[in-house]
Amino acid sequence: MKNLLLLGFTLLFYACSNDLVYENAYCLTNVHTIDAKDGLQMDQTVIISEGRILKIAPTASLSLAASNTIIDCKGQYMIPGLWDAHVHFAYIEDLAPRMFDLFLSYGVTSVRDTGGKLDFLKEWKQKAEQNPQDAPRVKIAGPLLDGMPNVYDGSPGRPLLSVGAGSVEEALSIANGLVDDGVDLIKAYEMLTPEQFKAVAKFAKEKGLKLTGHVPLSMDVISASNAGMSSMEHLRNLEMSCTANTEELLAQRVKMLEMGAEDLGGILRSRIHAAQRHEAIKNMDEAKTEAVLDVLLKNQTWQVPTMSLYNGSVRKHVARPDWRASFEYLPDSIAEKWNTGVDNLIAIGASENRLNYAKWCGDIVKRIHEKGIGIMAGTDCPIGFLTPGLSLHEELVILVESGLSPLAALESATLKPAEYFSMQNELGLIKEGYIADLVLLKSNPLENIANTQTIESIVKAGKYHSQEALETMRTRLREMN
């Protein structure tokens, strides 16, 4: 009798639950879902209500009420919304008002801004928070926290993206101010001294924030990772720590920093890179490289390679007709500069050093992935003629060419960034209870990662944006000129 009563209550519960779940919701039926945990699941129905995924089940197992909005996605593939984990809203301020529509129209539903004036970035973060269904999620670092002379100081060719600290106390004061202003992470830069970097890393850990950035030129990668660096951008300065004479190179850099203390930061940094980067690549040491990777793995210092940035003149993707077509979404003045810049880039071609560096980047990314070190997909857009949104898809292609599987590449742009911000329990997977940030594709990205570009529609915070709605975004961008 007791068991019969329990069964009766159970059936009543499921009946009530079905009434709740299957009415007045978005129901995307007959869709093949793909995420980093469950891989490919065929012919599913994904039910969305109040911004979240309410139910996922085989389409054949469900009976849907007519009060639902039912969208037949037969033949389509659903992936979690994509992240670009390295963008700059403030690099070209006139482009920023278009970046929300650009990102969404290319299926990028979240971004991590890695450097710019704080007030400017807070404005875009607040706009995104106020309108979450029609804007990408925006995480910000605020300005780059640099030493002196700082690199992005507002001098020609170097937009004012950073603040320079002349002492440990000043670096900590700046970091504390950023925390008070609500940044989501802190980005350390190349001119910090070891003492400044270590102090900021300790401070970030105490505040529960991730510390990302470039390994300071006055440090080696192992020391920076051991100090608490949670992620490295662009593989920057990694090569200089993977040679047999790492200590000698570091001593040379420290001397060059001392001698150039009165120079502009951008000029000094470029001088040091030119003196050491390419020689280091020619003299990679297997044992030292393995030791560095072991430390990155132990400390969980993730990598954001930004391969699309380094490969502009090598792959020439920025000169492709489809890429140039995306320039029509930019302000006319920017599109004109980019077209001229691309023409010049192609005319000059890739130098031997650039070709060698691009190859080394691909090789080391493969080793990083095989080692098990976390990778996040980021592009550095809009630097290097990288159209916001579109550039993320190119990044995924290059990551696969570098040795990641298509599923691993998808993970780098979905689950990994969610984990980075401790959001893995509500974002980055297609799972019941998760935020409904989703992209629907016409073709299977596991067969060809370039199929992430075959976007049929997106869902942002539960709002379904049809192909027509995405085209409206693009039309709006074109008409802004």
Image (spheres, rainbow, N blue to C red):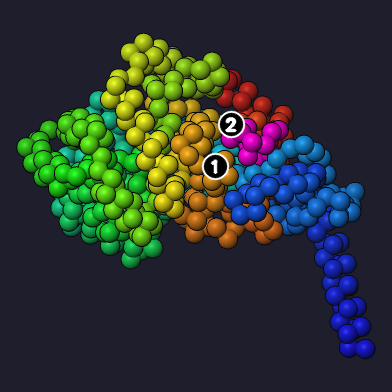
Q: Is residue 418 above or below residue 158?
A: below
> Which residue lies most toward the bottom here?
1
Q: Helix, strand, or loop for circle 2? A: helix
Residue named by callout 2:
450
In this rendering, position of residue 387 left or right of residue 438: left
Label for residue 405? 1
The answer to which quarter of the image holds residue 161 is top left
Identify the residue at horizontal 14%, vertical 47% (top origin): 247
- Please tell me whether residue 148 belongs to the stretch shown in magenta: no
Identify the residue at horizontal 15%, vertical 42% (top origin): 249
- Please tell me whether residue 449 belongs to the stretch shown in magenta: yes
Identify the residue at horizontal 57%, vertical 24% (top origin): 477
Q: Nearer the viewer, residue 198 or 314?
A: 314
Q: Amino acid at mark 2?
A: Ala
In this rendering, position of residue 235 left or right of residue 308: left
Magenta segment: 437-451
Q: Nearer the viewer, mark 1 or mark 2?
A: 1
